[in-house]
Image: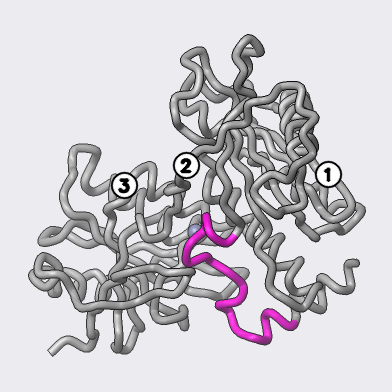
């Protein structure tokens, strides 16, 4: 008799998770999920010298070997996260020629509903190196309900239909997206300013030209009082500051202005024109925006979810179309977020006090 009762994520609706019974193909793998959790429970990889938070994890292939993983902290509150160490352990053992059923185990430490909550950066590495179908099983050390999700449950790229912005010399004051305050005129100017300023800010001598152009975006963070621009800052050690993070650092520098009104993300089209691919914002950048939004909420004393506009900007002025636009929000595009809210009320109280004192 297993000490864990396994459930699967059946639907995600407005960030509310609904658990269901395992699918037939998952029922056949219960012993593998148990093994993943057992290896995670006994993992000795973690060395959390700052947080004292032991992320006990594991990774492997169903019906084959499972390896331990964990978080290793260094520098000042810098960490190789458990999921990152898992990717390295997996590739060290299995190499690159394996497409079989991959399972990541995580010991739940009071996570809500025993759902794992990987940070944005870990979603980036798992997406690129392990794929959307990776199964993540998360359960408490001493048994109870353990939840099986897929990495795809933690991703959001189903944005819906592009709207077309078709006026270069926009004088139209009618609001964009229904009753919202932003006018087409202001919006078009914001997009143009974001491109011009983003090009000036960008420091990227190292990313291969033409490779994953949807990840090379410029950012405008509009707060209640100010505008802050951002572009990627990439140095040779490959630990970049991404564009949203760069804008956030400015918003918090002197003015202490986390009161987000909206965010504009812009990528330019390539020689092929619009190919339908919207800006791909790295999940680490979404994570940082989520935390800025949390500061805003703690200071305001209520929840808010500012809009995010993703724009593909047409560089060819001979075409009528100015660009294409999709809309999401800070909370929508980061499902099941990693958040201080999971650490308990005392953490939130002390963070609120800290942010208020900084104002
Ligand atoms: Zn992480």
Q: Position of residue 299 (x, y in %)?
A: 81, 73
The residue carrying pointer 2 sits among few (fewer than 14), some (14 to 19) or many (20 or more) residues within 10 Å by Cα, namely few
Q: Secondary structure at mark 1?
A: strand
Q: Start and end of the magenta stretch?
A: 331-349
Q: Residue at x 73, y 37 (%)?
A: 184
Q: Is residue 188 visible?
A: yes
Closer to the eye: label 2 or 1: 2
Residue 131 shows which numbered tag? 3
Q: Residue at x 44, y 47 (%)?
A: 157
Determine which residue is flagged by label 2: 161
Determine which residue is flagged by label 1: 227
Estimate the spatial distance between the alpha carbons at disc 3 and disc 1, rounded to whole Å.
36 Å
Q: Position of residue 276 (x, y in %)?
A: 44, 30
Disc 2 vs disc 3: Cβ atoms closer than 8 Å? no
Residue 160 drawn above or below residue 155 = above
Q: Residue at x 48, y 70 (%)?
A: 15
Estimate the spatial distance between the alpha carbons at disc 2 and disc 1, rounded to whole Å.
27 Å
Q: Residue at x 41, y 81 (%)?
A: 113
């Amino acid at each position: 008799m297993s000490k864990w009762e396994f459930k699967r994520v059946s639907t995600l609706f407005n960030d509310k998770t609904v658990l269901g019974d395992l699918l037939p193909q998952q029922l056949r793998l219960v012993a593998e999920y148990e093994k993943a959790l057992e290896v995670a429970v006994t993992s000795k990889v973690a060395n959390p010298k700052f947080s004292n938070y032991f992320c006990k994890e594991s990774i492997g292939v169903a019906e084959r070997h499972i390896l331990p993983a964990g978080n290793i902290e260094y520098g000042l509150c810098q960490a190789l996260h458990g999921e990152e160490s898992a990717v390295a352990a997996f590739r060290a053992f299995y190499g690159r020629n394996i497409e079989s059923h991959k399972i990541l185990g995580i010991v739940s430490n009071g996570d809500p509903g025993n759902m794992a909550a990987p940070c944005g950066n870990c979603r980036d590495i798992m997406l690129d190196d392990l794929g959307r179908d990776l199964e993540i099983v998360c359960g408490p050390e001493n048994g109870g309900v353990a939840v099986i999700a897929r990495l795809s449950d933690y991703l959001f790229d189903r944005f819906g239909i592009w709207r077309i912005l078709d006026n270069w010399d926009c004088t139209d004051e009618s609001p964009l997206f229904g009753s919202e305050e932003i006018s087409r005129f202001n919006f078009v100017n914001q997009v143009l300013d974001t491109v011009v300023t983003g090009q000036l800010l960008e420091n990227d001598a190292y990313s291969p030209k033409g490779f994953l152009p949807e990840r090379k975006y410029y950012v405008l963070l509009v707060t209640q009082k100010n505008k802050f621009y951002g572009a990627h800052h990439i140095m040779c050690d490959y630990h970049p500051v991404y564009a949203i993070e760069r804008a956030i650092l400015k918003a918090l520098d002197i003015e202490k202005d986390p009161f987000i009104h909206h965010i504009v993300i812009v990528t330019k089209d390539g020689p092929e024109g619009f190919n339908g691919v919207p800006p791909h914002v790295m999940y680490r950048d979404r994570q940082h925006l989520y935390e800025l939004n949390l500061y805003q909420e703690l200071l305001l004393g209520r929840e808010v979810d500012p809009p995010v506009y993703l724009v593909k900007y047409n560089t060819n002025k001979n075409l009528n179309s100015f660009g294409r636009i999709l809309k999401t929000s800070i909370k929508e595009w980061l499902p099941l977020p990693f958040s201080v809210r999971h650490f308990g009320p005392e953490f939130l109280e002390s963070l609120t006090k800290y942010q208020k004192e900084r104002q």
